[in-house]
Image (spheres, rainbow, N blue to C red):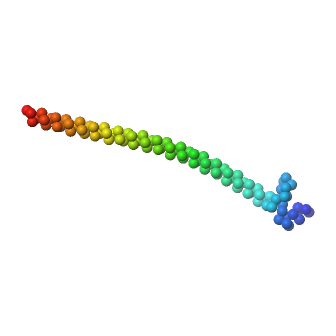
């Protein structure tokens, strides 16, 4: 009878005999949503940490690739320079003969 009077007033008694403003099933659903939201936040945090580590690894790889690219261009330019010098030396020898 007391429970009915409380319900009419918009108050509910939970399993621990505490007076609540929400119906027990609504409160349980709300708590489940809160727990689900916490799990999602934790998963997003883990995802964020993982993607940050991947981005950092790719940034390091990009720096390495740029260094190798510059080294390859330098080697190619040195080879072209040696070839030009070789052609110039051959022409000089032909003129002298």
What percent of the width, then of the height, locates residue 51? 54, 47
Q: Relative to 75, is 17 above or below?
A: below
Looking at the image, which residue sits at the far right? Answer: 1
Q: In which quadrant of the rendered image does the N terminus lie?
A: bottom right
Residue at 70% in and 52% down: 35
Q: Which residue is more in the foreground, 88 or 46?
A: 88
What percent of the width, then of the height, locates residue 97? 8, 32
Q: Which residue is more in the foreground, 64 or 28?
A: 64
**Residue 30 picture quarter:** bottom right
Q: Is residue 26 left or right of residue 44?
A: right
Looking at the image, which residue sits at the far left? Answer: 97
Q: Is residue 73 left or right of residue 22?
A: left
Q: Is residue 63 left or right of residue 81?
A: right
**Residue 88 picture quarter:** top left
Q: Relative to 60, is 10 above or below?
A: below
Instruction: Please state the total of marks drawn on the protein image.
Output: 0
What percent of the width, then of the height, locates residue 92? 13, 35
Q: Is residue 93 left or right of residue 32?
A: left
Residue at 29% in and 39% down: 76
What percent of the width, then of the height, locates residue 43? 62, 48
Residue at 77% in and 58% down: 27
Residue at 85% in and 64% down: 7
Looking at the image, which residue sits at the far bottom? Answer: 8
């Amino acid at each position: 009878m007391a429970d009915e009077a409380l319900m009419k007033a918009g108050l509910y008694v939970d399993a621990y005999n505490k007076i609540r403003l929400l119906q027990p099933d609504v409160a349980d659903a709300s708590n489940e949503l809160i727990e689900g939201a916490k799990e999602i936040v934790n998963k997003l945090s883990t995802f964020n940490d993982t993607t940050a580590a991947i981005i950092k690894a790719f940034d390091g790889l990009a720096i390495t690739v740029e260094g190798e690219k510059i080294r390859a261009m330098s080697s190619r330019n040195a080879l072209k320079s040696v070839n030009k010098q070789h052609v110039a030396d051959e022409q000089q020898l032909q003129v002298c003969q």
